[in-house]
Image (cartoon, rainbow, N blue to C red):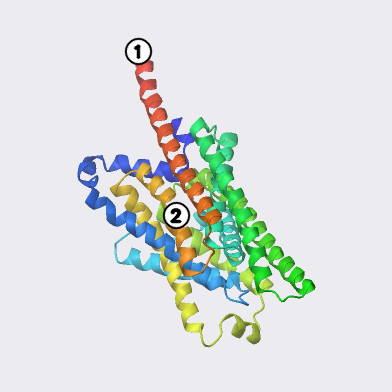
Amino acid sequence: MANTKETLPEDVAELRRNMATSTQKDNSDVSSAIPPVVCYCIASIMMTLVNKFVVSGRQFNMTFFLLSLQSIVCVVCVSTVKKLGIISFRDFDTKDAKMWFPISALLVSVIYTGSKSLQYLSIPIYTIFKNLTIILIAYGEVIWFNGQITRLTMVSFLLMVLSSILAAWVDVNSAVESAGDSSTPLVGVSVALVSDTLRKLNFGYFWMLLNCLTSAAYVLLMRKRIKVTGFSDWDSMFYNNLLSIPVLLLFSMLVEDWGLENLIRNFPAETRNVLLFAIAFSGAAAVGISYSTAWCVRTTSSTTYSMVGALNKLPVAASGMLFFGDPVTFGSTSAIGVGFVAGVVYAIAKNNQKKVEMREAAVLPMSTRKS
C-alpha cells in the first residue's frame, strides 16, 4: 500500500535501486555518480535552450510541425540505439498502442503548451512557474491515490507559489519598463506598445497555465495506465513519440499554413540549416534526458535524482539570462532563488516521507507475524 503513495518516477527509481542492491556499494562512489548527474543536467539545459531558440523566431508559427520532427528524430534515435544492443524495449504491439494512445495525445498537449509558453515567456519565468505542476500532481494524488501532504511539503508549496508571484511581478514590471524605454516620446505610441507587451505576456501565462494543468493530468493518468500495461521507461518513451507523430502531423495539416510563403517565413534560407539542426538536436536531447535519468537513478538513488532535478532549475534559469538576454535584476534573481529553495525543500520532504513509509511497510509484516 505504501507504493501507491509515490509518483511513478520514484516507483521505478526505487525498483531499480532494489534490483541493484548487490552492486550498490560500488555504485555509490562519488566518482561513479558525477558523470550521470552532469549528463542529465547538460541534456535538460540544452533541450530547453534549443527549443527556446527555435520557437523564438520573429514569425515562427509551425509548432505542431516542429514537434512532429522532434518526435520522428526521437523514435529514430531510440530504435537505432536498440538495434545496437545498448537498450531494450518492447516491439510495437497494436493492443498496447490502443491502450497507450490517450497518454500520447495528452503528451502532445503538454509539449505544445510548453512550446507556446516558451514563445512568449523567458526561460527563468517558465522554469519557476513549472514548479506549480508539482502542487497540482500532489493534490491529484491525494484525491485519486490516497496520497499524503506533509507539513514540510506544504512549506515547499508555499515557497513555489511565492516564487511564482514574485517572478510574475518582476516580469510585468520589466516588460513595461522596456516597452516604455523603447517607445517614442508620443504618449499614444507608448501606451500602445505597453498594451501590446502586456497582451503577449497574458498569452504566455495562459499557455503556462494550460501547460501546468495538462502536465499534471498526463502524470496522473500515466500512473494509472502504466500499471495496466507494465511499461518501462523506454517503452513509454517509444510509444509516446511514435503515437504522437500522426496526431502532430494531422494538427499541423489542419491548423498551420503550409503555403510556400509561410514555409520560407518560418525557415528562412539564411538560418534554415541551423534551425533544422537545432530541431534534430532537441529530439536527440530528449533521448539523452531519458537515458541519463535511468543512468542517474541506477548509479545513485531516487533521493539524489530528485535533488538533482531541484538543483537543475538554477542553471536552466541562469542559461536563459546568459544566452537570451533575459533581464538580470534583484527581483528576478530573488524569484529564482526562492524557486530553487522550494525545489530543495520539496526533495527533502519527499525523502523524509519515503523513509517513514518504508518504516511503516517494514513494521506491518512483523506485526502481522506476531498476531
Q: Which residue is mark 2?
A: 314
Say which residue appears at 37% left-offset and 44% top-offset.
13
For residue 99, say whether it is visible. no
Say which residue appears at 36% left-offset and 68% top-offset.
80
- Amino acid residing under circle 2: Leu
Viewer-side residue, 44 vs 214:
44
* In this rendering, the label closer to the viewer, 2 or 1: 2
- Amino acid residing under circle 1: Lys
Say which residue appears at 61% left-offset and 60% top-offset.
113
In the picture as drawn, the residue positioned furthest to the right comes out as 188
Q: Secondary structure at mark 1?
A: helix
Query: Residue 125 location, x and y as percent?
Result: 56, 57
Say which residue appears at 48% left-offset and 34% top-offset.
5
Q: Are marks 2 and 1 in contact (CB under 8 Å)?
A: no
Q: Indicate left or right for 47 with 58 as reference.
A: left
Q: Please tell me which of labels 2 and 1 falls first in the chain.
A: 2
Query: Residue 220 location, x and y as percent?
Result: 55, 45
In the picture as drawn, the residue positioned furthest to the top comes out as 371
Density class for disc 2 (Cα within 10 Å; few <14, some 14-19, many ≥20) is many
Query: Residue 273 location, x and y as percent?
Result: 47, 83
Whether 222 is drawn above or below 254: the answer is above
Q: CA distance from mark 2 to mark 1?
A: 50 Å
Q: Residue 21, located in which quarter of the rendered image?
A: top left
Q: Indicate left or right for 110 with 357 as reference.
A: right
Q: Which residue is mark 1?
A: 370
Whether 261 is drawn above or below 117: the answer is below
Query: Residue 89 location, x and y as percent?
Result: 38, 57
For residue 305, say whether it is visible. yes
Q: Indicate left or right for 176 with 290 as reference.
A: right
Whether 254 is drawn above or below 44: the answer is below
